[in-house]
Image: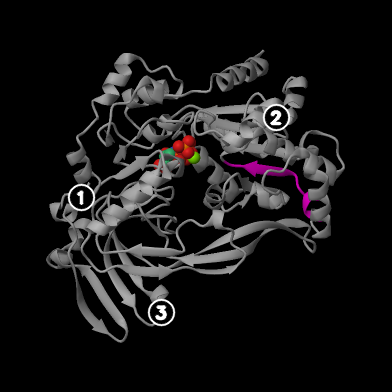
Amino acid sequence: MDSNNEETKPAKSGREQSNIGIEIWRKTQEKREEKDTSLIEHKPFAPSDKDAKFEINAEIERAMHALKNSNKHIFITGSAGTGKSTLLRRYIETNDMSHTAVLAPTGVAAINVNGETIHHFFGLKPGCTPDDMEDAVQRAKRRGKMKLFKALDAIIIDEISMVRADMFDCIDMFLRKIRKIDEVLGGVRLIAFGDLYQLPPVVTNQEKSLFEDYYNSPYFFGSRTFYELYQNELRDFEYIELTKVYRQRDSKLIDLLNAVREGKATDDDIELLNQRVVSAREIDELNDESIYLTTTNAKADERNAQKLQEIDTESFMFNAETEGDFPNQFKPTTDVLEIKIGAQVMIIMNDINGKYTNGTLGQIYEISYNKGNPMKSKVKVRLKDTGRLVTITRNTFDAVYNSFDIKNGVIIRKTLGSFTQFPLRLAWAVTIHKAQGKTFSSLIIDLERRAFAEGQTYVALSRATTFDGLYLTRPIRKSDIIVDQNMVKTLDVINMMLHA
Ligand SMILES: Nc1ncnc2c1ncn2[C@@H]1O[C@H](COP(=O)(O)OP(=O)(O)OP(=O)(O)O)[C@@H](O)[C@H]1O
Ligand SMILES: [Mg+2]
């Protein structure tokens, strides 16, 4: 953590100088300190994917081997922080993807792996069912997509835990019809990554009763498609579990998190966790150094708005520029971004030099405001974990789609539309749902009235890297730890069948 206490005080700021159209606003009390950034610059900084050594253990090796050489469907799973996403990125970067589509169930998850949403790739309308797939296939044909689907050997799906059984059946039906191959997924290989103990697919209250008439589990393995794989005794299915946790080093913390994951936390475990409860007053101070995780959007928005308002400095607004088709659900941050000097933000992209990654927290230190073209302004952010100052300029996020390149006979990624905005979002608070997949060295968890989703408390706790970096606004109750026992039984059955 930053040792400079000045940092935690509400920011004061002032206009330092102005030249042609550019105004530089900065935390005034830091001007003195700025001369001495060498100290800060040389602090070791947190490992990013680029900097961290990519360790290859026996499980990772087995997974890589299966990804490259097996022709079976593969599910790569493992608890939080075992390196699933890291492995997925490595695999995509270092292998031929010319007959593979990279997909994810949500826009944010898709952007994370430079992929496309499942809905967009298959042209699925919201609420569609497998019976609607004939229409979807006709639409795809009219749009000249036949060759794309014929050329497909594999689909990679990240965050498979959020793919609902009916969506999986839609994918299967679509691929069978368009490829005219009556096999599971029309003969396309599935490469799935995810942890089913984390947040589950969303089934709304309105959908619940209808959904339960057809499916006894919301997860992808509750689908009829997966039932076919069971009938075939999972001969076409490979299940690889990564067990070495990289996000946390402390083995006691890892054991504690695993107990929460599996719903096996004892009273003693919960008591130990609850030693991390702190008072409301302390929370307020801590929040200037740590992120605050909520269960609801309303609470996160309210906290961000309140914290921003508390800062008594000039407010700057930046309007995003959108080109082509950039679906709202893909947008990694707001169309209108309001920031102030001293605001706590999350950087939502990876730095090519590895200084920060998607999810790194920082504080706005300086805004060089370009009056003529605000989007050409520059924002300096002081990173929380390292004290390093980094300059952030606007970034163009592309929504990509998979397309078939007739000349070369391969699948290529094309841009559907782009969204240009500063890669920042206010981050005093975010929901646990939005924190999925991320790592934080210091975090406050507010389970509000109650945790309401399976795996929610586990996802929140497992974002932390150390026990000391974890704070709770209220004691965790046993009822906050929710595990879908039906899912656990199914995973047992899968393991039994595969190891019989
Ligand atoms: N093979 C590896 N060698 C060294 N460090 C790793 C390795 N894999 C992951 N890490 C580090 O561990 C942390 C967590 O990795 P990652 O986000 O890939 O885990 P995950 O399994 O996807 O977690 P989650 O289920 O929470 O999404 C990252 O900081 C990453 O740099
Ligand atoms: Mg991940």
Q: Earlier in the sequence, mark 2 or mark 1?
A: 1
Check disc 3 and report the residue beneath it: 373
- What amino acid does circle 1 point to? Asp
Of the image marks 2 and 3, the number of the one nearer the N terminus = 2
User: Do labels 2 and 3 touch, CB within 8 Å?
Assistant: no
Is ligand 1 less than 8 Å from the beta carbon at label 2?
no
Q: Amino acid at mark 2?
A: Ser
Please state the horizontal and vertical placement of residue 144, each as a whole percent of the image: 81, 60
CA distance separating discs 3 and 1 = 33 Å
Pick the residue in front: 125 or 355. 125
Q: Residues within 10 Å of mark 3 (few under 14, many from 20)?
A: few
Q: CA distance from mark 2 to mark 3?
A: 51 Å
Helix, strand, or loop for circle 3? loop
Q: Secondary structure at mark 1?
A: loop
**Residue 77 on image: x %, y %:** 55, 31
Question: Which region of the structure is painted magenta?
Answer: 147-158
